[in-house]
Image (cartoon, rainbow, N blue to C red):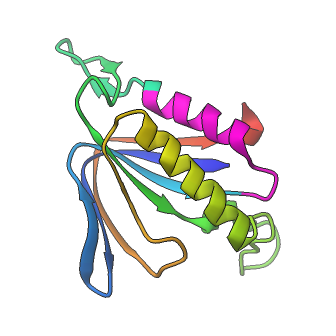
């Protein structure tokens, strides 16, 4: 799995110009799945994301987790994180998971995040979405379970 995490002061997802999800302070997660991903990858990423200390403490150091600051998460599926651009000018997405498997793992990931007690909003799997965000910091971190 690959998750691109962005610390945000706000983020939203719109479909056909209608906002379907919105959060204030927290994380925007762009989530991609490959066919070999399962429960182990989900558990690993949820643990890393929930424990990640990138919010500022009183001394201005990135030392607080999302739960420490009562933040929220917006999780959006994005298979394009598996783009292969090594050949030509048109990306290949052959490493991205098959849609049925990817959707099941994405749903499991979101359920595991919800179980942590952190408020969660989601995009709509496989929909054409407009994502807006105000990146805070900016802080952008890539997680890849193949590189742990």
Q: Which residues are magenta?
A: 34-50
- As displayed, is residue 139 above or below residue 92? above
Residue occupying image coordinates x 31% and y 75%: 14
- As displayed, is residue 145 above or below residue 13? above
Please tell me in which quadrant of the rendered image residue 40 appears: top right
Magenta segment includes 131: no
Disc tally is: 0
Q: Is residue 148 left or right of residue 78?
A: right
Q: Is residue 134 left or right of residue 113?
A: left
> At which x and y percent is residue 95?
79, 63
Most foreground residue, 147 or 117: 117
Instruction: Specify the principal SS of the magenta part.
Output: helix
> At which x and y percent is residue 4?
52, 49
Residue occupying image coordinates x 63% and y 41%: 42
Q: Residue furthest left?
A: 58
> At which x and y percent is residue 133?
29, 59
Most foreground residue, 24 or 111: 111
Q: Is residue 63 left or right of residue 31?
A: left
> At which x and y percent is residue 138?
33, 43
Residue occupying image coordinates x 46% and y 82%: 128
- Can residue 109 be seen? yes
- As displayed, is residue 141 above or below residue 102? above
User: Which quadrant holds the C terminus?
Assistant: top right
Residue occupying image coordinates x 31% and y 27%: 67
Magenta segment includes 39: yes
Please tell me in which quadrant of the rendered image residue 12 appears: bottom left
Most foreground residue, 33 or 141: 33
């Amino acid at each position: 799995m690959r998750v691109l995490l962005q610390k945000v002061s706000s983020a939203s997802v719109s479909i056909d110009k209608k906002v379907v999800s919105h959060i204030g302070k927290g994380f925007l997660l762009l989530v991609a799945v490959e066919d070999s991903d399962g429960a182990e990858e989900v558990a690993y990423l949820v643990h890393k994301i929930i424990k990640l200390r990138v919010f500022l403490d009183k001394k201005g150091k990135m030392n607080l987790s999302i739960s420490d600051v009562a933040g929220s998460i917006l999780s959006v599926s994005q298979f394009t994180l598996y783009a292969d651009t090594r050949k030509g000018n048109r990306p290949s997405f052959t490493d991205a998971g098959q849609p049925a498997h990817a959707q099941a793992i994405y749903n499991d990931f979101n359920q595991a995040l919800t179980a942590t007690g952190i408020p969660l909003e989601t995009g709509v799997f496989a929909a054409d979405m407009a994502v807006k965000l105000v990146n805070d910091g900016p802080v952008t971190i890539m997680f890849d379970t193949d590189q742990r």
